[in-house]
Structures are given as structure tokens and as C-alpha cells.
Amino acid sequence: MTSRRVIPLRWPAVVAVAVVGLVGLVAFTWPFFATGDVARDHGNDAPWFFAVLLALLAVVCLAEVTAGRLDAKTIAVLGVAAAAGGALRLLSAGTAGLEPMFFVVIVAGRVLGPGVGFVSGSLAVTTGALLTGGVGPWLPFQMICAGGIGLGAGLLPGRAGGRTERWSLAAYALATGLAFGVLMNLWFWPFLGTNAPSGMGFVPGAPLTENLGHYGLFYLATSLGWDVPRGVLNAVLVVVAGPALLRVFRRGARRAAFGTPVAFEPASGATAPAPGAAAPAPGAAAPGPQRLHGAENSR
């Protein structure tokens, strides 16, 4: 069976996610392109500006994932994914970089599609932050990173089921565990100033190659030891528990029957009135029971 997106990403959601991604890219990479004056005068405004803008774009994205409506089934799926991810983050709280939350986000994105993967990743981070008290200027950056991980999982090619899917998801979990740390350090690295280790700090207005070199040294010295355990843990979880969780999500998606049209038709044995027949008298018994067509697909 080929992999398909249970909840497709329609064009309004594509536009919303693209705008969020563009804003996120600017918010993460501005130190490498801003002039010295801009970095000194407005650098500290970037996290707060991005927090407000991301909140607004997240609302738009959430509204557009299902082309303008969130039915009960989609809300339930998002709630389960966000609650599971938040609970896993509560267990570890990022200790030694171990964050099994991304395992759930990756599986949800793979099964349910990139749109739901993006929103579930963002909501899982938010839920975990509320549970652990980790709300701060870093939260919008975590939301965009976790949402991007879920989005990418939904865009992965390949067939559903089998070892190929399991190992490709494991490799993706390992790579995104490292990428999460690479990006997240950028939200605070430009503001370390003299607190940064020698030769590893941000230099406003310096050439791109110089700041990239400084940041590369900073990442290797301070973050790589935390990011490797995160990636390895989630890759192991995908290999060990991934098949079971994939089956759970796919079974739930089949029962929810996303996108199945609902129509009514007469029950078996009911006959239509003959042409020209009189309408039933008031108080008369109603015609045979109606059957909800398409309900079989949700079982």
C-alpha cells in the first residue's frame, strides 16, 4: 500500500505554512545578514516581534489546515497528538537533550499529513511548556521547529509499512534531532555578547563567513552533546515502538474516515412512493428508517 495523506494539505494551508516558514527563516538567520547598526538597535526586538507574528500565523494555519473548518474528528486527533507529545516532554523536560516528544510528532505527521503534523508539533511544544513552566521568548522558536519536524515527516516519500518506512523515519528522527539544536541556538546566540566563549560570539556587521565560523564553533562546543542524545533516542523509539504507533494512528484514521462524504439513503426494503401518490396524512407513520451512507467506512 502506498503512503497517502489522510488529511491533505490544501492550498490555503500551503500559503499559511509557507508564510510561517519564511518568517521563521528570517527570525532564525537574521544575525548573518543584518548590518551592525540593525543588530545593535533592533536585535533584542526580534524574539518578541516573532512571538506575536507567529501566534497570528499559527491561528491562520490552524484554521486553514482543513480548508476553513475544524471538525470534531480533526480536533480530537490534534488533541491526542498534542497531549501525548506534551506528556512525553513532561517526563524528560529536555534533560541531557532527551526529548521523546518528537517521536510522536514524527509519527503523527507521517500518518495524518504535513498540515496536521505542523499543527500537532506546535501544539505539543506549547502543551509541554505549559506543563513544565517553560514559557518564555524561546517558545515561538520551539513551536516553529517542532511544527517543521511534523511537516517534514508528512512530506517524506515512500510506501507505508515495512522496514523501509521504519528506517527512513528513524534516519529522519536522527537528522531532525540535530537540526532542532542547530536552529534553536540561534534565538539567543546573537545576544550573548561578552558572555560568549572567545572566538564563538556574534560580531555585528562582520562578514557572513566569520559569523558562520563563530557559530559553528559555538554549536560544537556547547550543543552537540545535547543534540546527539535527542536524535538517537527518537531514532531508537521509531525503530522499536514506531510500527505499533503507526498502526494505532492509521487505525484511528480509518475509523475517523477523514474526507468520507456523508449522505442519507433509504434503508433496505423501503420503497419510494409511486408517482402521483398522495402525501401521507398528518400523524401517519413516517417512511422506513434512514441509513447514514458511509458510516461503514468509519468502523
Image: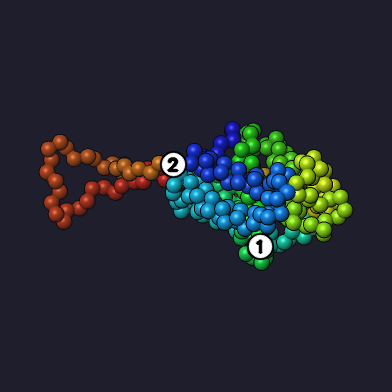
The residue to which callout 1 is attached is: 136
Q: Amino acid at mark 1?
A: Gly
* Residue at the (70%, 50%) spot, across then down: 37
Tell me which amino acid carries mark 2.
Thr
Could you tell me if residue 250 is visible in this image? no
Corner quadrant of residue 153: top right
- State the image coordinates of residue 8 (x, y, percent, origin top left): 51, 40
Q: Nearer the viewer, residue 54 or 295?
A: 54
Residue at horizontal 65 percent and vertical 63 percent from the top: 135
> Of helix, strand and loop, which one carries label 2?
loop
Q: Characterize the local packing of mark 2: few (<14), some (14-19) or many (20 or more) Cα atoms within 10 angstroms.
A: few
For marks 1 and 2, give the CA distance.
41 Å
Q: Is residue 49 visible?
A: yes
Would you name the residue on which mark 2 appears?
260
Mark 1 / mark 2, whichever is N-terminal: 1
- Whether residue 179 sits left or right of residue 260 in the image: it is right
